[in-house]
Amino acid sequence: MLENFRRAMLFWWGLAIAFTLVVWSLYWPRTETQSIATPPLPALGAVIDATSVSGISSGAYMAGQFEMAHAKLVKGAAIIAGGPYGCSESVFADQMPGPGTAFLNLGKAVNGCMLDLLSAWGVGDPQNLADKAKARAAKGEIDPIADVVTDRVYLFSGKEDRTVVPAVVKRAAEFYRKLGVPDANIEVIDTIPAGHAFVTESEGAACDRSDEPYVVDCDYDQAGALLKHIYGPLQPPSNQPSGSYIEFDQRAYRQAPATDGLAQTGIVYVPAQCARAGGCRIHIAYHGCAQNRQAVGDRFIKGSGFARWADTNKLIVLFPEVATTVSNPQGCWDWWGYTGHDYLTRDAPQITAVRSMLDALKGGGSNS
C-alpha cells in the first residue's frame, strides 16, 4: 500500500510540474543574457555525412531525435540516461492547441519516460514507438528507417540513477532492436555505480552523485567509449587538449528565436589540424537539464573529455546550448514539445538550428 501511495504521489507531482511550467510559459517573458560581438561558426570544410551525436538526460532524448530526423547524416548515437524516441508523445497531443500539447506530454515524460511509473499502461513500449517512428518516416517527417538500421548505438544507465531509471534506458535499446538495428551495433552499459551524470575517468564529483555539474568520476572514460563504439578503433587521446574552444553566435541558425529555447551562444571545439584543413568529422554533444553554461559554466564542455579524443582523431565537437529561462528553468532540450507539435520531426526548431550549424561547419573547405 505504501508503494502504491508513493507511486500515486510521484504521478501527481509530475502533473503539477507540467502545469507549473505551462503556466510559466504563458505568463512570464523569456529572457536571455545578451552577448556582444560573438562570431558565427567557422567554415572548416567538415565532412557532415559521418556525424555522430550524444547526449545526457534531455540531451539524450534530443540526440535520439536528431539521429532519427537526419539519419542520412548520422553514423551513430549515444543515449546516456535517456529513453526511446517519441516516448513522451501523448496520444491526445495533436488534439490540443498551443501549450496543451506540452502539458499532456510533460506529465507523461516525467512519470513514464523518466520514473517508469506508467509502463502498465503501455508508456514507453518499444514496439509501439518503433511503429510510430516508421509511420513518421513513411510520411517524410524524418529520414528513412533504413538509414537508422546501419547506425551504431551506445546506451548508458548508471546503477545509482534515480532520475531516469535503468528500465527506461533498456527500453531505448529495445526500441532500436525493433527498428531493425542489429545487436552487434548496440552496446548497453549498465554495470557502473554512477548517478544521473556524464561519466569520466578522473573528472567531476563522486561516481554516485546526481547533482551539478552532472559530471562524475567513475574511472570510466565515457567520451572515449562511445566514440570508439560509433567510429571503431581510434587513435589514443591527447594528454591535454591543444585545440580551441570557440564561442559562436547561435542566432544565425535559429528559425524561430522567440520559441526555440536556444541560448544566444554555443561552443565548438576545433582541433588544430581541423582549423588548418578540411575533412574532419563532427560530433554533437547535447548537455542535460541544469547542465548548460548558464548553470555550470564550462564544466561539462571541458570536463567530459571529448576534446582529448577530438585532437587525435580529426573530430570537431559541437556543443549547442539551450537557455535557462523562466519558462524552461532547468535549461532542458525539447523532448516533450515546448517548441511546438513538430518537436520530433526534421522541422523541429532546435533540430533545424543544429542542422544549420552542421552546414556552417561544412562550408569553405575543399573536402566538404
Image: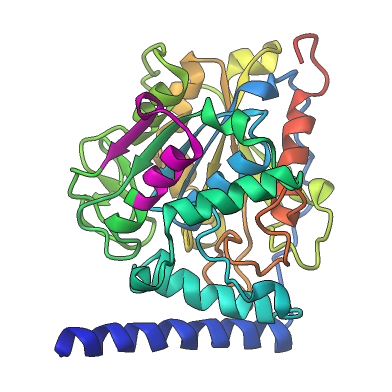
Question: Left or right of 20: which side holds 250?
Answer: right
Question: Left or right of 185: which side holds 196?
Answer: left
Colour option used:
rainbow
- Residue 341 lies, in percent from the top left, at 72, 66
Q: Quadrant of the C terminus?
A: top right
Mainly helix, strand or loop, the magenta region?
A: helix
The part of the image, by quadrant, that contains residue 153 is top left
Q: Quadrant of the N terminus?
A: bottom left
* 182 in the magenta segment: yes
The part of the image, by quadrant, that contains residue 319 is top right
Q: Is residue 319 visible?
A: no
In the image, residue 323 above or below residue 226: below
Residue ID at (27%, 39%): 189
- Residue 300 lies, in percent from the top left, at 44, 47
Q: Which residue is more in the foreground, 345 or 144?
A: 144
Q: Which residue is more in the foreground, 146 or 277?
A: 146
Residue ID at (28%, 82%): 7
* 254 in the magenta segment: no
The part of the image, by quadrant, that contains residue 101 is bottom right
Q: Which residues are magenta?
A: 171-189
In the image, residue 111 above or below residue 152: below
Residue ID at (34%, 28%): 225
- Residue 215 lies, in percent from the top left, at 35, 49
Q: Which residue is more in the foreground, 364 or 8?
A: 8
Question: Left or right of 253: which side holds 108?
Answer: left
Question: Left or right of 133: which side holds 160?
Answer: left
